[in-house]
Image (spheres, helix red, strand yellow):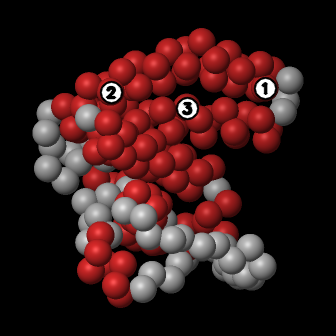
Amino acid sequence: MLIAHEVFNSIALFDTAMTHGGCDTEIVGRAVASGITVAIAPAAIVHHVIPPYRLTSSYFRWAATRAGCQLAYRDCKKCGRARMFLVCVARAGQVILVNLPLLILSLSMGNSSQSLYRRCLLWRANGYVRQAASIAIRSKGGLLTSRLEFRKERTSFQHVAEQ
């Protein structure tokens, strides 16, 4: 992502309170909302080096839970606490009525990719609920979610990366 210095002068810096990620998406949203032209380069080629620990179930769990935290924070910031809590209840219902039964079905059919996908959705819902609870108890630093901060990824998985 490339951002001109003038954009920061116009709409402010990244939201550093978004410790679970998503600050890049959030700043683009603010830029668009303020009338700044945003462009993409579909022909650009980006090479990502993916370390082996990012292909483990524990990493998928961490990343999906962190994504849920980020979604709850964004929902609260954008729409308010009341709406975030309504979405939290809806996500809990979706877990019970949709994703948990589909996880059980995929496990019984031996479909490992579908099982992992459903687990990720459950972990994301878990992160959303945890972040909503942290917001409800006004936990500074996210008492329930602090180990999910994206800046802590390498230290959280350092033992896996060294193997």
Q: Name the residue at 26% across, 35% down.
A: 80
162 and 111: which is toward the camera: 111
User: Taking 19 as reference, is 2 above or below it?
Assistant: below
Left or right: 68, with 115 as reference point: left
Q: Amino acid at mark 3?
A: Leu
Mark 3 and 2 residues: CB-CB less than 8 Å, in contact?
no
- Answer whether residue 58 is visible to the viewer in this image: no
- Answer whether residue 117 is visible to the viewer in this image: yes
Q: Upstream in the sequence, badge 2 or badge 1?
A: 2
Which dot marks residue 106? Answer: 1
Q: Amino acid at mark 2?
A: Arg
Total marks placed: 3
Q: Upstream in the sequence, badge 3 or badge 2?
A: 2
Which dot marks residue 122? Answer: 3
Task: Give the quarter of the image for residue 118.
Answer: top right
Left or right: 91, with 89 as reference point: right
Q: Amino acid at mark 1?
A: Ser
Mark 2 and 1 residues: CB-CB less than 8 Å, in contact?
no
Task: Give the quarter of the image for residue 109.
Answer: top right
The local secondary structure at tag 1 comes to helix
Q: CA distance from mark 1 to mark 3?
A: 14 Å
Q: Name the residue at 71% across, 21% down.
A: 102
Residue lying farthest to the bottom in this orientation: 5
Which dot marks residue 83? Answer: 2
The local secondary structure at tag 3 comes to helix
**Position of the C terminus by quadrant:** bottom right
